[in-house]
Image: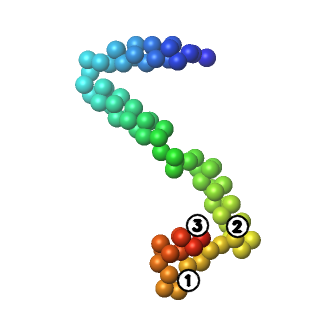
Amino acid sequence: MMTTLQTNAELFRAMSEIADDETLMAKLMKYAKKLAAKKHDPTLMTKEEFFAKLERGEEEYRQGKTHRMLPGESLEDFLKRVG
């Protein structure tokens, strides 16, 4: 297993090989930004996590653990009531 220092060194070595190619550097930057965005987005989940969450929701629904909006109730009022 590589240490953080070794990983950084390997990354910079790879970057130095493409540094003079503007097209490759643009692709690298685009991918790096995409990876950084994923790291900071708490809503991202795998397919397995997504379907497991759906299954939990369906089971709660079958058990009657649901909330319904009252007629004429605003979303804001509903969220205050159930939150």
Q: Can you say whether 19 is above or below 30 in the image?
A: above
Q: Is residue 49 left or right of residue 62?
A: left
Q: On the image, numbered disc 2 is attached to which residue?
A: 60
Mark 3 or mark 1: which is in front? 3
Residue lying at 59% horizontally and 54% vertically, measured from the top left: 50
CB-based contact (under 8 Å), mark 2 and mark 3: no
Tell me which corner region of the image, top left, top right, bottom left or bottom right, holds residue 68.
Answer: bottom right
Mark 2 or mark 3: which is in front? 3
- Dot 3 surroundings within 10 Å: few (below 14), some, or many (20 or more)? few
| Cα distance between the residues tagged 3 and 1 | 15 Å
Closer to the camera in the image, 79 or 50: 79
Q: On the image, numbered disc 1 is attached to which residue?
A: 70
Element type where label 1 sits in the image: loop
Q: On the image, numbered disc 3 is attached to which residue?
A: 83
Give the residue type at disc 1: Leu
Residue lying at 48% horizontally and 45% vertically, measured from the top left: 41
- N-terminal of the two: label 2 or label 3? 2
Q: Can you say whether 35 is above or below 81 in the image?
A: above
Give the residue type at disc 3: Gly
